[in-house]
Image: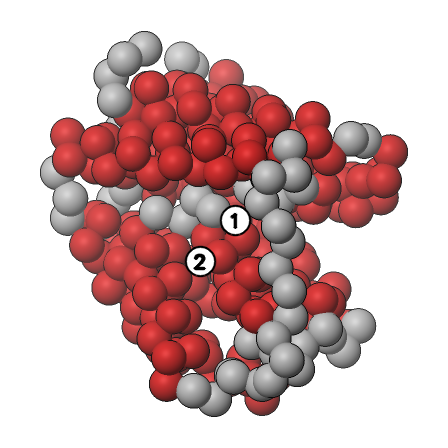
Amino acid sequence: MSPEALAALGFVTGLVAGWVNVVAGGGTLLSLPVLALSGLPPMAANATSRLGVLSQSLSATVVWHRKGAIPWKLALRLLPVSLVATLAGAEAAALMQTELAGRVLAIIFAALALLTAADAFGLIAPPAASDSDSSSRPATYAVFGVIGLYGGAIQAGVGLLYGYTAYRLGALTPAQANALKSLLTLVFSVGALTVFVARGLVDFGVGLPLALGSLVGGHLGATYANRLPVRAFKLAIALAAAVTALRFAHLI
């Protein structure tokens, strides 16, 4: 594929993924499969997809900050442990052999495909806010550390994990939980990209158009989200995740 075709593919993929992230969440489950199918090795696709995640989370964080929704006191407590865990996860992923990386990603995307399909058909109950504020408990830092470790290594689906956990902390409104998720995702995206760029795993030829498309798609999604069926998006995400699992398992 020519550099121009890859750039165009990156922009269109980012456009769709940015839209999907606003409408239904899980845009990375669409962008990473396209990058993988374009010929990038598993970990290079994983690393390059972070440019789109970075642009989306930056835009979202700015919006949440302007709305005063970010719980800064809690965020500043969670950011250090999340960032350290993210750097460790990204470093571990960068050192992973290509064949092993493909197997790990195949298993993860197969699981995410099943979970997303179940969510589309209402088989997974939405998270309920906790009756008490547990944000200061040691277990909370441990959970966010584990999510950061996973996010640094893989990314796909981490926004859902952050959002669910943040809402379960208690004393947070849904808007605050989403705002916290966006801020943490922004910070760990910067950390993971630092590692992946240093390791030479990021393809900027497709990654920068992906980031630009993600910005545009996110804006369009916020504008027209209520006009499109969320279930259709979630089923499309599940299908893309299933195809990616098969690709990484070398079955297609």
Percent of width and height locating residue 25? 61, 44
Above or below 119: residue 53: below
**Residue density around tag 2, few if under 14, some if 14–19, many if 20 or more, within 10 Å:** many
| Image coordinates for residue 35, horizontal then vertical, percent | 42, 27
Disc 2 + disc 1, Cβ < 8 Å: yes
Q: Residue at x 25, y 22 (%)?
A: 249
Determine whether 197 is above or below 31 in the image: below
Residue that numbered label 2 is attached to: 189
- Dot 1: within a 10 Å radius of its alpha carbon, few (fewer than 14), some, or many (20 or more) residues? many
Q: Label 2 to label 1, Cα distance in Å?
A: 7 Å
Residue at the (85%, 40%) spot, across then down? 226
Residue occupying image coordinates x 42% and y 20%: 243
Q: Quadrant of residue 218?
A: top right
Q: Can you tell which mark lies on residue 1? A: none
Residue 23 is drawn in which quadrant?
top right
Secondary structure at numbered mark 1: helix
Q: Which residue in the protein does label 1 denote?
A: 53
How many numbered dots are placed on residues in this image? 2
Q: Nearer the viewer, residue 242 or 152?
A: 242
Instruction: Indicate left or right for 57 with 199 as reference.
Output: right
- Percent across and percent down for residue 2 are 42, 14
Q: Quadrant of the C terminus?
A: top left
Of callouts 2 and 1, which one flags the residue occurring earlier in the amino acid sequence?
1
**Looking at the picture, which amino acid does disc 1 mark?**
Val
